[in-house]
Amino acid sequence: MPVPWETLLPFGLVIAMFTVSGAGMSTVSYIAEGYKPRRYNTDIWDHQMMRRDQRLTNIHRGQSDAPKAPRGFELSSQWRLEKRIS
């Protein structure tokens, strides 16, 4: 059975566009995560630590090794205030 050679050019273009779009999405994700690999299989503990790190450094993927929290950290608690009904 002969190969229809005229179909290889559009097929090559489709493959190239999937490759370019996949590489672009990967690059955008890498840049958005602060030039670090994307996190997979995160659980509740990981999300809690990510929110704490966000409050400590004001950077999505930032981490700090300072022994003392920065000024104002005590005011940025993740706990929401509840109104008491008396």
Image (cartoon, rainbow, N blue to C red):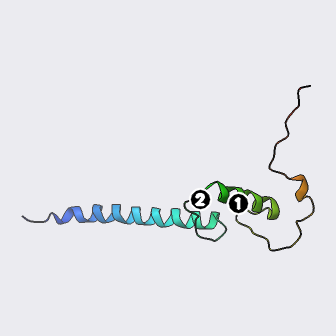
Q: Is residue 75 found left or right of 54 in the rendered image?
A: right
Which of the image's four quarters has the N terminus? bottom left
Numbered badge on residue 42 = 2
Is 16 displayed left or right of 60 in the figure?
Answer: left
Q: Which residue is located at x 64 percent, y 63 percent?
A: 32
Mark 1 falls on what kind of element? helix
Residues at circles 2 and 1 in contact by the CB criterion of under 8 Å = yes
In the displayed structure, does residue 69 sit left or right of residue 23? Answer: right
Q: State left or right for residue 21 relative to residue 51.
A: left
Residue type indicated by callout 1:
Met
Quick one: which residue is furthest to the front in this view? 86
Q: Amino acid at mark 2?
A: Thr
Q: What is the x, y in percent for residue 66?
A: 85, 73
Label 2 SS:
loop
Question: Camera-side residue: 85 or 33?
Answer: 85
**Mark number for residue 50?**
1
Label located before the other in sequence (2 or 1): 2
Mark 1 Cα shell of 10 Å, populated few (<14), some (14-19), many (≥20): some
Q: Position of residue 59 (x, y in %)?
A: 75, 63
| Res. 16 image quadrant | bottom left
Q: How many residues crowd around disc 2 within 10 Å: few (fewer than 14), some, or many (20 or more)?
A: few
Q: CA distance from mark 2 to mark 1?
A: 10 Å
**Frontmost residue, 42 versus 28:** 42
Residue furthest out toward the top: 86
| Position in image of residue 25 (x %, y %) | 52, 62
Which residue is at 88% across, 66% downward?
69
Residue 58, image quadrant? bottom right
